[in-house]
Amino acid sequence: MMRTGLTGKLFLALIASCLLVMFGTLFALHENFRHGFLDYVKRINETRVETVATAMSRFYVEKGGWDFIRKSPAPNESWFLLLRAVAPVSGEPEPSHSDKPMPPPGFRTHLWLLDEHHQVLAGLDKPPADVFTRPITVSGKVVGWIASTPPTTITRQADVRFFDEQVRTAWRIAALALIVAAIVAVMLARSMVAPLKRLAETTHQLAAGNFHVRVPVDSRDEMGQLGEDFNRLAHALGKNEQMRRNFVADVSHELRTPLAILRGELEAIEDGVRTLTPSSLTSLQTEVATLTKLVDDLHQLSMADIGALAYRKSEIDVAEVVRRSLDAFRERFADKGIDITVSADQLAMMFGDPDRLNQLFNNLLENSYRYTDMGGRLDVTCRLNGPTIVLDFQDSAPGVPESEVPFLFDRFRRMESSRNRASGGSGLGLAICKSIVEAHDGQVEAKASPTGGLWMSVRLPGLPA
């Protein structure tokens, strides 16, 4: 069996709902009209019976009693002639196909003429037990009765035709409504499913690796929101794929150079071109140290990405951690002629990991040391701004191109392609800094420094006073 598509399912659901509502409405209207019409017929019949009873009282006075009916050779015919004279109608013939005796033309029920003792004077057959009667009075005295059956069905031909015509009209309206509903259901189903089809086609392209594909969004409803979310997903996947490719390329590039140096040095020693001396061993150890640091940095980043980097937090004074980190760098900065100024509040308490924060500050100081020209300066401040601890590291020239600032925390990002490992490191230090700050629910921002270099601003949540 062929599977019904979403358009077909939605169409069938809408049509089924319309049919259910339509048939329910038709049934309710049919029953309401039938009962209402019967009530109308009942009221008309009662009025006719009252009219006949009044007329029969006049005939009784004129004829001097009921002998003109009793002594008539055909009492029923005389009775029907009187009824036609009392309530003349359009001369509707009595139907010949009915197995039961029908009421006289113009009347919707059978009528009987009874005397004052309820004996039948005229009428077809014997009146049933459920008849209702109206008295015929003369001078306040009951001289007879008019009996009539209650109208439980529609028998008059004109009434039947009217009722049937109303039913046929209702069915015509229902058929027209169904056609209109089908057209609207088709249009609605197509309009609702069309965005889903576009989304499905775009999803197939995205799954095939086309991360540049986008869904056109032309509405502000849930479908439009879904399209926007899909476009954001496609953008994120494309960005992550590009980052993955760049990461693999950068890692292979970073590993290739020290491995090539190690291989060249070892081959030179093996071939006797170079002798194994303390100097050659130092060169080999330098390249091994570079590889070790690169692998360690990659390991820390991977652990941070999966949330497995261990943090042992406690109440610490951030200003004290900054001072310790600066003490370890003072001699190196002095050798390069870089002047350090420090401004730190007495206490800047927070809940954090002192070792990770020390690693954060070391990376920032290492970055300033590598990139600041000889004879420059570094200003370090640690201050409280309400419940937030603000740490600023501002160094002197050279500065960072404005176009490079948004990408400083990307992995393997160097400010200048001319800078090699000796000056620029592995390109993972600032990425590690960002992960440490975010693990402490803080923020780190890079911008141009007023002193001509780079301004690294770190904001960490402090402890309430």
Image (tube, helix red, strand yellow):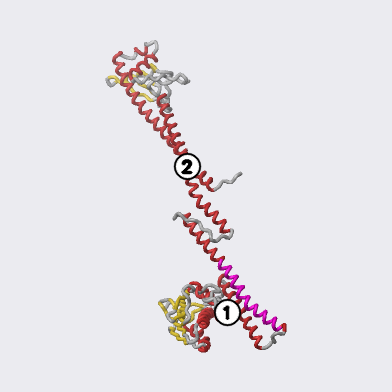
Amino acid type of the residue that numbered disc 2 sits on in the rendered structure? Ile
Q: Residue furthest right?
A: 271
Question: Judging from the image, what secondary structure is the residue with disc 1 in?
Answer: helix
Cα distance in 3D space between marks 1 and 2: 71 Å
State the image quarter where residue 108 is shown: top left
Which label sits in the foreground, 1 or 2?
1
Nearer to us in this view, 60 or 193: 193
Please give the residue where the numbered disc 2 appears in the rendered image. 183
- Residue 393 lies, in percent from the top left, at 46, 80
Bin the neighbour count of mark 2 within 10 Å (Cα to Cα): few under 14, some 14-19, many 20 and up.
some
Upstream in sequence: badge 1 or badge 2: 2
Query: Image quadrant for the N terminus?
Result: top right
State the image quarter where residue 241 is shown: bottom right
Residue beneath the point at 49% across and 49% down? 192
Please give the residue where the numbered disc 1 appears in the rendered image. 421
Residue beneath the point at 52% across and 64% down? 236
90 relative position to 400: left or right: left
- Residue 281 lies, in percent from the top left, at 66, 86
Which stretch appears magenta?
242-269
How many marks are shown on the rendered structure?
Answer: 2
Amino acid type of the residue that numbered disc 1 sits on in the rendered structure? Arg
Q: Residue furthest left?
A: 139
Where 56 falls versus 272 (above or below)?
Answer: above
Query: Image quadrant for the C terminus?
Result: bottom left
Nearer to us in this view, 132 or 457: 457
Q: Is residue 400 magenta?
A: no
The answer to whether any part of residue 354 appears in the image is no
State the image quarter where residue 29 is shown: top left
